[in-house]
Image: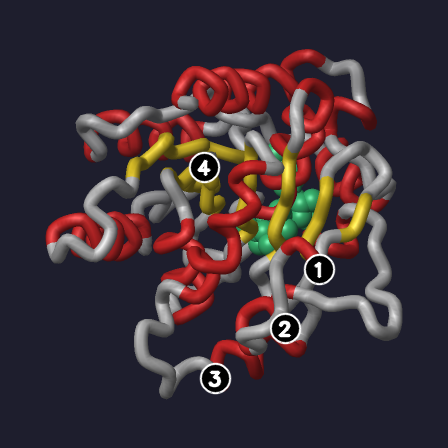
């Protein structure tokens, strides 16, 4: 199953969640993570420095001859990775004039479905061509949302984009795995955001919130998935719940 982890807002824990989920999935099955953000945070977060000659998401996107398989690198915790760096930003511009330019990633990732049970795509903070390619490649989307005022801001636009892909028959089978509230704390702001998500998004699964904890940025710095960094169950369990949902959907 291919999951796009997406929200056009930055700093909502897309990358952290991709690492957390990839780490858990790789414990029991094959998992590929695709860095599809020119910031390359997933790549650095998994401890990868792109070596000269290493192919990245950029080549996969712009070079017809470049297979996705040949761009895969191994990372420490069993997660396989297609890395990215800033060159991906120019890749987005280079494909703008091409016909059928929203299906490039889909075509490149499809052959990898035989090799990997799970493929996670970490999206950039925008709703441009990169995210569109990720949505078109995905079977389902996971939407991390930060528990704060205006939690719904921007979400409407993302949901409308998904809805229009389905309606226009461009991608009728695109599922929404769910919304993952992140950085939840004991404040009224968090309670309010959770209530808003639960009441304003009928029919969409709202996962158990991920607590706000300094251990997440620390685990990023340590280049470790959260379950390897800490034994604190309450930080790991929300991600285990998402993994459970993903495995049940296959
Ligand atoms: P995005 O990929 O959506 O831009 P990141 O995953 O890079 O977001 O997260 C943004 C920042 O928030 C990072 O510094 C990360 O370590 C931190 N972060 C992620 N999840 C949590 C959390 N549950 N509690 C506290 N900080 C978090
Ligand atoms: Mg990110």
| Residue at 78% in and 51% down | 73
The residue under label 1 is 71
Q: Secondary structure at mark 4?
A: loop
* Residue 236 point in image, percent of width and height: 65, 19
**Depth check: 12 or 39 in front?**
39
The residue at the point 79 percent across, 15 percent down is: 231
Mark 1 or 3: the one toward you: 1
Residue holding disc 2: 59
Residue 167 placed where, x, y %?
12, 51
Q: Going from the N terminus, do you reach mark 1 or mark 3 first?
A: 1
**Whole-Å distance between the Cαs marked 3 and 4?**
33 Å
Q: Residue at x 57, y 60 (%)?
A: 36
The foreground one among 34 and 19 is: 34
From mark 1 to mark 3, how far is it between C-alphas?
A: 21 Å
Image quarter where the C terminus lies is top left
Which of labels 3 and 2 is toward the front? 2
Location of ligand 1 given as a quarter of the image: top right
For disc 1, does the CB lie below 8 Å from ligand 2? no
Foreground mark, 1 or 4, reads: 1
Label 2 crowd (10 A; few <14 / some 14-19 / many >=20): some
Do callouts 2 and 1 mark residues in contact (Cβ within 8 Å)?
yes
């Amino acid at each position: 199953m291919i999951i796009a982890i997406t929200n056009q807002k930055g700093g909502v824990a897309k990358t952290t969640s991709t690492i957390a989920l990839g780490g858990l999935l790789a414990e029991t099955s094959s998992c590929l993570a695709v860095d599809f953000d020119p910031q390359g945070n997933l790549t650095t977060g998994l401890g990868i420095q792109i070596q000269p000659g290493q192919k990245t998401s950029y080549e996969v996107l712009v070079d017809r001859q470049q297979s996705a398989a040949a761009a895969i690198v191994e990372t420490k915790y069993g997660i396989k990775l297609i890395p990215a760096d800033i060159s991906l930003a120019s890749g987005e511009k280079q494909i703008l004039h091409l016909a059928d330019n929203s299906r490039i990633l889909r075509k490149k990732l499809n052959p990898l479905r035989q090799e990997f049970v799970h493929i996670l795509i970490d999206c950039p903070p925008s709703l441009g061509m990169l995210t569109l390619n990720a949505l078109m490649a995905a079977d389902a989307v996971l939407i991390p949302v930060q528990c704060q005022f205006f939690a719904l801001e921007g979400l409407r636009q993302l949901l409308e984009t998904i809805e229009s892909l389905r309606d226009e028959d461009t991608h009728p089978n695109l599922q929404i795995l769910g919304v993952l509230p992140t950085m939840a704390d004991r404040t009224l702001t968090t309670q309010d955001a959770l209530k808003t998500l639960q009441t304003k998004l009928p029919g969409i699964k709202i996962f158990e919130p991920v607590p706000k904890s300094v251990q997440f940025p620390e685990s990023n710095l340590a280049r470790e998935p959260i379950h390897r960094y800490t034994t604190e169950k309450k930080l790991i369990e929300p991600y285990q719940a998402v993994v459970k949902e993903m495995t049940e959907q296959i």
